[in-house]
Image: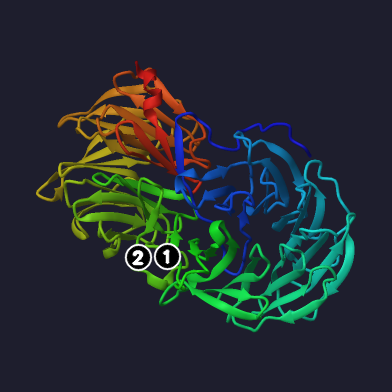
Amino acid sequence: RTMAANLIKPCLDHPSFQHHFIPNPTTERGHNFHLGVNPKQRNLIAYPSGKLVVVRDLNDPCKGFMYRGHNAFVTVVKFSENGFWVASGDEMGKVKIWSWDNPEHNLKSEIYGIAGPIKDIAWDSESKRVVAVGQGGMNMRVFTWDSGNNIGTLSGHAKNVLSCDYKPTRPFKIITSSEDMRMQLFKGPPFCIEKSNSEQHNNFINAVRFSPDGNFIASAGADYKVWLYDGTSGDPLKELPIGHKGSVNSLEWTSDSKHVITCSSDKTCRYWNIEKESCDKIFTFAENPEIGDQQMSCAFVDGGKIASVSLRGDISILDPNSESCMPSKVICAHQVAITAMCLRPVEGKLITGSFDGVVVAWNESGEAARFKGQLGSKTLCGASHSNKVSGIAYSTAGIVSVGWDDFLRLADKDTLEYVDSVSLSGQPCGVSANPSSEFVAVATSSTVALYKKTVLIDELEASYVPKSIALKNEEEVAIGAESGTVYVYPISGGKLGEPKEVKGHRGAVTALSYSFDGKYVAVGDAAREVTVWETSEGPWTAKVQGLWQFHTSKVMCVSWSPDSKLIASGGTDESVYIWSVDFPRKRIFYKFANKFGVDGLCWLSDKRLASSGGDHAVAVWDVEKDMEAFS
C-alpha cells in the first residue's frame, strides 16, 4: 500500500536537537546480514539496529541518521541506485520505501514483501524495481518500488532464501541463493526462472552478487567456498582457492569488477584478485582474535576502502592499498538499549552502559571507546558485565558500574580498563557516587550498602524494596522505595545511620537526584510526577509538588543542571521535560526524544543535555534555544 504521509515522524527533527551518538549494527551469531551503501555518497552506510534503521557517515559520527518507521526488528537496508530512496525490510516481512534526499524522509510505500523475515533486498539499476527475499512460504518477491505490483514470479527454493541481487546491465536478471544450497537465475521482466545451480556448494549459500559490469556472479557459502559464474547465462565458471576456515558470510565486488572482498566467521576478510584467482590480502582484527571478531558483513565504501562488521558490532575500516593488514579505524558503539549513563565532569565525556553489559565512553565528536572488562573472551559483545548495566557513576577512585550479574566493578578513568570488582549481596537497582569522594552507594533488591572504592564499609538490610538511589557527598544517601517513600540515611564515620522517611509520592520512586549545590532533591515516580524537596537535617519540605505531572507514563530518570537551576526528566513515554524551580508553572518539552523510552539523562553544560534510552543511542539537545520558555 502507498502511504501519502507518515502519521508519526520517522525521524527526530526538533529544532533543539543537535545530533545523535548513533548505535552500531545489531548482530546475531550464525546469522549474517548485508550492509547498504549509498551509491552516490559512499561514505554513508546503512544497517539495522533493533527496530531502527541507522545511516552512518563514516567521516563524521555526529552526522548519523536514525529512521524510526518500523514496528518490528529491521533486518536489511539498501539504497536505490540513484541515491534518492531507501528500502528497509523487517522480520514481519514488510518493506518500507522512504525518501533519503527529502529532509522529512517521507514514507513512499509500505509493502508486504514476503511471508516472513526479510534477509536481503536489491534495487535495479533504474531504481524502479525491488526484489526482496527471506523466510516463509512465499520467500521471494519482485515488485515495483512505488505501487508494490508484482513483476513476474520468483519460485524454486525449498528453504529460506538468504541473498539476492539485480543485474546492473541489460538484459536484466535476478540472482538468488538459499539454505537449500541452490543458486537460481531469473530472467525478465516479467521474471521467470532461467537457471538453477545446485552442485557448487554443499552448505548454505550466504551471499550472491553480480559484478558491476554484469559479466560475473560471485557466491559465498557456509562451506568456506567462493564460486564464480557467468553473469549472463549463470553457468558456473570456477571456484576460488579455499582460503577461509569458516563460513563465508558476505562478499562484495570492487567498482572495476576485478576484485572481491569476502568476510568470514574465521575472523578474517580476504581480498581476492579475480583475474589471477588468488588472494592478494588477508585482513585480521586482533593478535588473539575472540569469538566477537567473527566478520558478519562487508562492503566497499568511500575511497576504495572496505567496511567490515564484526559479531560484536564493531565497524572496521580496511584499506586494500595499505601495507597493514589491520583496520585503519575501528568504530564501536552500543548494539542494544542504553540502560545507564553518567558524565566525566572534567573532560565532559559521557559514559554509557547497555542491556548486554557493554560500557562505552564517548567524546564530543561522537567517537566511542569500549571499556575493557574483566570478562575477556567470555562475552561475544566485549561486555564488562555479563548482564544488564543497571547503574554507572563517577568517583575520585574511577568509574563504577553495577549490573545484573550482581557485581560492583571499578574502572580506571584514564585507561578505561576495569581493575577491580566485588560481588554484591543481591541484584542492584542503582549506584551513586560523587566526583569529590571515594564513597560509592549501592542499592540492591533488599539492602543498602556503602563502599570505599570496592571495599564494603557498611551494609543495612532494607525493610522495603529499593528502586533508586542518590548519594550526597559523604553526608547522606537517599533511597527511593517501591512504596513511594524516600528513605534518607545519614553517613557518619563511614557508617549508615537510622533513616528518616520522606512521604508524599503516589507511586514507586523510580528516580532520585541531588542538586549540585546540595539544597534540593528531585524525585521522579511511577505515577508520572516529578517532585522537588528542600533538604534539611529535619523534615524535608516540598519545594514543587503536584505541578509537574505531564509525563504520560513512568518517570525513569531525573538530572540537575550544573548550576542547579534546571531539572530534566525522562520517562517511558519517550519524552524529555525540562523544569525550573524558579518558574514551576513553565516547562520545555522534547517529544519522542528516545524511541522506546528515556532511561538516562546527563547535562553536558548548563545549556546542553544528553538523553539515552531504548533506541540504543544518545541524543544531544541545545536547551539554550528554548530558554525563553522560562522568561
Three-letter residue code for mark 1: Gly
**Earlier-in-chain disc, 1 versus 2:** 2
The residue positioned 23% from the left and 45% from the top of the image is 346
**536 lies left or right of 114:** left
The colour scheme used to paint the residues is rainbow
- Could you tell me residue 55's position as x and y percent? 56, 48
* Quarter that holds the C terminus: top left
Q: What residue did someone put label 2 on?
A: 373
Q: Is residue 553 visible?
A: yes
The picture quadrant where one finds residue 164 is: bottom right
Crowdedness near tag 1: few (<14), some (14–19) or many (≥20) residues, C-alpha within 10 Å: many
- Alpha carbons under labels 1 and 2: distance apart: 7 Å
Residue furthest left as drawn:
493
The residue positioned 41% from the left and 77% from the top of the image is 288
Residue furthest top as drawn:
631
486 vs 189, nearest the viewer: 189
Q: Is label 1 in a helix, a strand or a loop?
A: loop
Three-letter residue code for mark 2: Gly
The picture quadrant where one finds residue 618 is: top left
Q: Is residue 429 visible?
A: no
Callout 1 touching callout 2 (CB < 8 Å): yes
Counting every numbered tag in the picture gives 2
137 vs 121, nearest the viewer: 121
- Could you tell me residue 54's position as x and y percent? 56, 49
- Could you tell me residue 529's position as x and y percent? 40, 29
Q: What residue did someone put label 1 on?
A: 382
- Could you tell me residue 121's position as x and y percent? 71, 56
Q: Is label 2 in a helix, a strand or a loop?
A: loop
606 vs 551, nearest the viewer: 606
**303 lies left or right of 628:** right
